[in-house]
Amino acid sequence: MSQGGCELAGYRGVAYQALKAAQVSIGDVIRIVRAGEVYEGSLMPRSELGDDKHVVIKLASGYNIGVRVTSDCKIERIGVGSKPTYTHVVREVGGRNLPRVDVISTGGTIVSRVDYRTGAVEPALSASDLYNAVPELSELADIRAHILYSELSENITPKHWSGMALKVFEVIRSGASGVVVCHGTDTMGYTSAALSFALRNLPVPVILVGSQRSSDRPSSDAATNLMGAVASASKAPFATVAVAMHESTSDDAILLHRGTRVRKGHTSGRDAFKSMNSPPVAKYLLQTGRLEVYCRDIQRRDPERNVELKNNFEERVLHLKFYPGMRAEIIDWAIGEGYRGIVIEGTGLGHVSRTLQDPISRAVKDGILVGMTSQCLYGRVNMNVYATGRDLLSVGVQPLEDMIPETALVKMMWALGQTDKVEEAERILKTNIEGEISQRTLYDDPP
């Protein structure tokens, strides 16, 4: 919306009239005085889906606030600014004998910015855009960017896992020294587990990376997470799937978590990702560029190793989190719908109510693979301790040791995708393949 030379994108009603009277434009530095309070900052575009009574400014700290326009509100321009834009800069790289790292974009906050029409975070940046936005990457690796998907992580399905695994397989076969997969954080733990199983005999690291805050926010972790991921993919001595995210709220270090052991534990914190029942694989120190490796029992990097692709996933697998009062009909429904597997997230050592034992028994007899995990964040299931657990064992429920529920779900999908025989799928499910099961879980305070 423009009138009288004032460009006021997204504003309407009361707020538009107040800004129009002050003769200000998007990007101008303005002062708002209201009820004795003074606010100063750059005028930002307004979400078209928002109300018509607030003016949005970006403070010197970098944060945006909305100021309600009232009858005693005074707005004045105190500086001329420019409209917020995103400019793509072409940057030539290569030819400097750096390791080649392929960056595969699938979507998520790390490849997103604010859509000022709606006020929401939208997938908008390609992996190439991120490379241009983080010039430090040019000192770490010879980047080759690929746009595979532009999906927020809640839209990712097992079919996307298969596609990601195929793309990673292809770039490794074409000579990549490491691979980075940009992904939304909400389901990144599922995808990291899926790639861990689908890519066998890896010769180089495959690092998933995301961000909790979009790249146009001053508190964004996108650039630093990406730097840690690219550096690790280029020089890490191990060849496994890992997730690279902030160790803490500061910009000191990026932790690398084993792809089958990681869980998102906070909705918005930069240090949301933690390794479960396992130490992190490594730490990348942002100030020095040093990579500290913690996990020794892990496959070493070997460019001569031939990667294998096994990217079939069976989608007819149900993840059930037990709760008091859960009705048995849901298990009978799964039987009737032709589901091939059920992962139960039981209480404590691996329990559900006795009312579910008969339908679970029917599911097993019908050829459905049923595995038990725990709702507890740490520790392992032990179904031999109490009668409830022993009863479930007797009807054929498989205890899944200290595997976290998300990994158990993905692994069951993968196991059933490799064979039509439930006995073979059971064997695969209970075999430690990518560090998802340990022989012993030590009691310790959670990290």
Image (cartoon, rainbow, N blue to C red):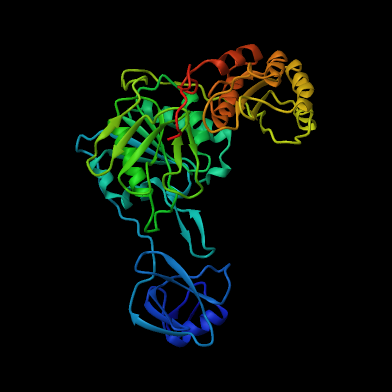
Residue at 52% over, 63% down: 119
Classify the position of the C terminus by image quarter: top left
Residue in front for this viewpoint, 328 or 431: 328
Give the image location of residue 113, x and y in percent. Answer: 44, 56
Q: Looking at the picture, does residue 228 appear above or below residue 170?
A: below
Residue in front for this viewpoint, 6 or 152: 152
Q: Quadrant of residue 400?
A: top right
Q: Looking at the picture, does residue 208 appear above or below residue 131?
A: above
In the picture, measured across the screen, residue 333 lies left or right of residue 253, that is: right
Query: Which residue reaches farthest left?
Result: 96
Residue 324 visible to an observer of this rendering: yes
Give the image location of residue 54, x and y in percent. Answer: 52, 75
Residue at 38% over, 56% down: 219
Q: Looking at the picture, does residue 148 appear above or below residue 28?
A: above
Residue in front for this viewpoint, 386 or 97: 386
Give the image location of residue 327, x and y in percent. Answer: 78, 34
Q: How many labels were placed on the picture?
A: 0
Give the image location of residue 70, x and y in percent. Answer: 53, 83
In the picture, measured across the screen, residue 396 lies left or right of residue 217, that is: right
Residue in front for this viewpoint, 416 or 358: 358
Residue 335 visible to an observer of this rendering: no
In the picture, measured across the screen, residue 442 lies left or right of residue 228, that is: right
